[in-house]
Image: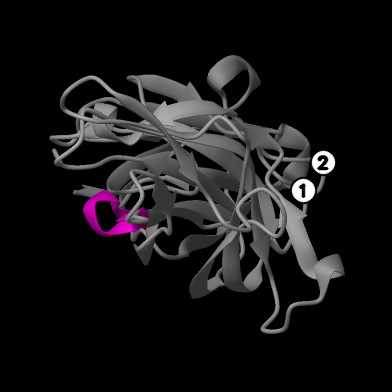
Amino acid sequence: MKRKFILPLLLSGLVWFSSCDSDSDNGTAKMQVRMTDAPGDYAEVNVDIKSVQVHKDGDDDESEWITLDQINPGVYNLLDFANGKDTLLASSTLPAGRISQLRLVLGNNNTLKLKNGEVKPLKTPSGQTSGVKLQINADLESDVTYVLLLDFDAAKSVVPRGNGQYNLKPVVRTITQAVAGGIKGKVTPAEYKPGIYVISAANDTIGGFANDAGDFLIKGVPAGTYTVKFYTEGDAHNKTVENVSVSQDQIKDLGTVVLE
């Protein structure tokens, strides 16, 4: 049975708004952690997740671990997330650069429910102390949104101890995917301070504003082709840029947009 965790930003709904950043080189990327699986040989595999951390360097320096600040802690039955279902576990904005490891810090309330209804404690050696460490080795580009899939093989991860007891030794395959890029540029004259709308073919809209210097950055834009509209006060200097192609792993630079 395989479970997938996703680490970054979930985009949903028909209309949503993204803030504009005055510094297009802010050196951060967005990530989110999700969980899913396929049916297995147990009734329940309950894992008590307290914290999710990532390590930005290749060594084990404790000072390099970053705790994801948007965490949904709790006891998760991994088998609840079969057949394409998933749940958001954690998300955060992280420094751009290399992420070498992910660590799941577990609590004490881990249990295994057998098919006959019997519930067994699920021991997790070192899971509550040093945490369960997973190798990631992914490079995060600035301003790009990522999903980290943790393909959790629960069948192999539950290990009988031979005395009617069980250990949890996670067997996990990790996959990092960029899921959204963005659009940046500069408007002139800057004093027009336009509202900016990124509109998809399905009329889904992401919006933001240019700053005092005329710079704009719209993050979290899924791959696709968009119309970008610039609206100024009184509509006197509105402008439309069509057929703007965005890939999921980069920021599209429109350069200087002249509002006439």
Residue that carries the numbered disc 1 in the rendered image: 22
Q: Residue furthest front?
A: 163
Q: Main secondary structure of the magenta part?
A: strand
User: Can residue 117 be seen from the camera position used here?
Assistant: yes
Q: Dot 1, how many residues are within 10 Å of its Cα: few (below 14), some (14-19), or many (20+)? A: some
- Left or right, 200 with respect to 235, comes to left
Q: Looking at the rendering, in which quadrant would you find the C terminus?
A: top right
The one of 86 and 107 positioned closer to us in this rendering: 107
The one of 213 and 47 positioned closer to us in this rendering: 47
Q: Quote the CA–CA distance across marks 1 and 2.
A: 8 Å
- Left or right, 30 with respect to 178, comes to right
Q: Residue at x 64, y 56 (%)?
A: 131
Q: Position of residue 18 (x, y in %)?
A: 57, 33
The magenta segment is 150-159
Task: Say if mark 1 contacts mark 2, CB within 8 Å.
Answer: yes
Asked if residue 158 lies in the magenta stretch, the reply is yes
Q: Residue at x 65, y 34 (%)?
A: 70
Q: Amino acid at mark 1?
A: Ser
The answer to which image quadrant residue 41 occupies is: top left
Q: Nearer the viewer, mark 1 or mark 2?
A: 1
The one of 154 and 71 positioned closer to us in this rendering: 154
Q: Position of residue 160 (x, y in %)?
A: 31, 53
- Left or right, 240 with respect to 30, comes to left
Q: Position of residue 247 (x, y in %)?
A: 34, 61
Residue that carries the numbered disc 2 in the rendered image: 212
Q: Position of residue 200 (x, y in %)?
A: 28, 35
